[in-house]
């Protein structure tokens, strides 16, 4: 029987692309996110068997039900891709407790709960592959991203600790730290001023820039051509949006 992968955030963006790629590689794929329609669209794009299970990963009992159902139907989950997440950008003084807690719940606590639920079966089988989609914000600080960066720094700590704890068991734990990828999340959080962050990062940046307080102008452009050309443009102009397909190759070149 082919291996079983469970992908959170499979309804869109990086999670959807990873799910399709894993399905193309021959795995059975459990697809999880909240929106049933988006999951159905991902399932249609997968060439192999899928199990679409709508679940809110910030709800501990929903995470349990998700893994219970996967185990009942297909046995233990052998590959976990924790991609469900969201961005949030605002000045520190505009970041409420609710904003802060939402980022930590979704980007840090939910991956922890998924790992905790996945590990026993992986440990027992002597095999497991866990990949958490972290961020470059896991490694550096950027203005207007306090809550997001804190959640993503935290999740990298989780990955490092879990990787060390599970060394020698056959279970590996890794993080992918993408820069800007061309997905709906980037569009919502950074690409244009929006409801996120009470006006959004772009609006705050523009206001700071007008006051002379901006560090640099951020221009997001869709990358064309080879990475090296993109790197040269990045040095000249700042961040570049990477096409989704390029990132997914990085995630799935290892054979599961
Ligand atoms: N895009 C980037 O530039 C970028 C860069 C670095 C890191 N990342 C990280 O990559 C991951 C995926 O981002 P993306 O760009 O692919 O975003 P995306 O296109 O917005 O996809 C996010 C997915 O997560 C799901 N999701 C959100 N909240 C959820 C919840 N409470 N329970 C279950 N599923 C939930 C969404 O579906 P529903 O809303 O239907 O639940 C959606 O399927 C995130 O962890 C993000 O931080 C993205």
Image (cartoon, grey):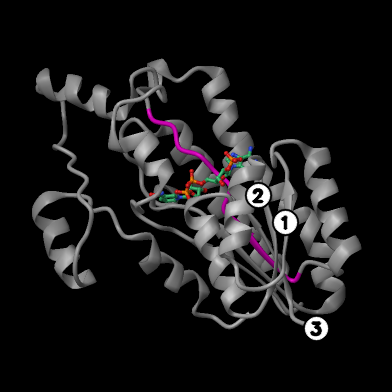
Q: Quadrant of residue 3?
A: bottom right
Identify the main secondary structure in magenta: loop
- Relative vertical location of residue 17 with respect to residue 147 in this rendering, above or below: below
The image shows residue 216 at horizontal and vertical percentages of 14, 37
CA distance for labels 2 and 3: 27 Å
Query: Do residues under tags 2 and 1 come within 8 Å of each other at their CB atoms?
Result: yes
State left or right for residue 182 relative to residue 19: left
Residue name at image x 54 percent, y 57 percent = 16
Q: Which residues are magenta?
A: 78-89
Q: Which residue is mark 2?
A: 111
Residue name at image x 33 percent, y 51 percent = 180
Q: Which residue is mark 1?
A: 115
Query: Do residues under tags 1 and 3 come within 8 Å of each other at their CB atoms?
Result: no
Marks 2 and 3, the one that precedes in the sequence:
3
Mark 3, other Cα within 10 Å: few <14 / some 14–19 / many ≥20: few
Q: Which residue is mark 3?
A: 1
């Amino acid at each position: 029987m082919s291996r079983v992968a469970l992908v959170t955030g499979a309804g869109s963006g990086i999670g959807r692309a990873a799910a399709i790629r894993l399905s193309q590689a021959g795995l059975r794929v459990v697809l999880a996110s909240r929106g049933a329609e988006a999951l159905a669209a991902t399932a249609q794009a997968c060439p192999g068997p899928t199990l679409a299970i709508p679940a809110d990963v910030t709800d501990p009992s929903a995470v349990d039900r998700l893994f219970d159902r996967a185990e009942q139907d297909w046995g233990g989950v052998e590959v976990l891709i924790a991609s469900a997440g969201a961005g949030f950008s605002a000045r520190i003084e505009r970041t409420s407790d609710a904003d802060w807690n939402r980022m930590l719940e979704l980007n840090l606590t939910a991956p922890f709960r998924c790992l905790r639920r996945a590990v026993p079966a992986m440990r027992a089988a002597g095999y497991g592959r866990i990949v958490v989609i972290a961020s470059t914000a896991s490694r550096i600080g950027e203005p207007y991203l306090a809550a997001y960066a804190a959640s993503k720094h935290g999740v990298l700590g989780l990955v490092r600790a879990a990787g060390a704890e599970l060394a020698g068991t056959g279970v590996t734990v890794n993080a992918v730290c993408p820069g800007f990828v061309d997905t709906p999340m980037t569009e919502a959080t950074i690409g244009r001023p929006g409801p996120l962050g009470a006006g959004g990062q772009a609006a705050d940046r523009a206001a700071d820039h007008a006051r002379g307080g901006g560090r640099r102008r951020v221009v997001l452009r869709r990358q064309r051509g080879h990475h090296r050309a993109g790197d040269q443009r990045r040095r000249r102009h700042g961040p570049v949006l990477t096409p989704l397909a390029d990132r997914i190759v990085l995630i799935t070149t290892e054979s599961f």
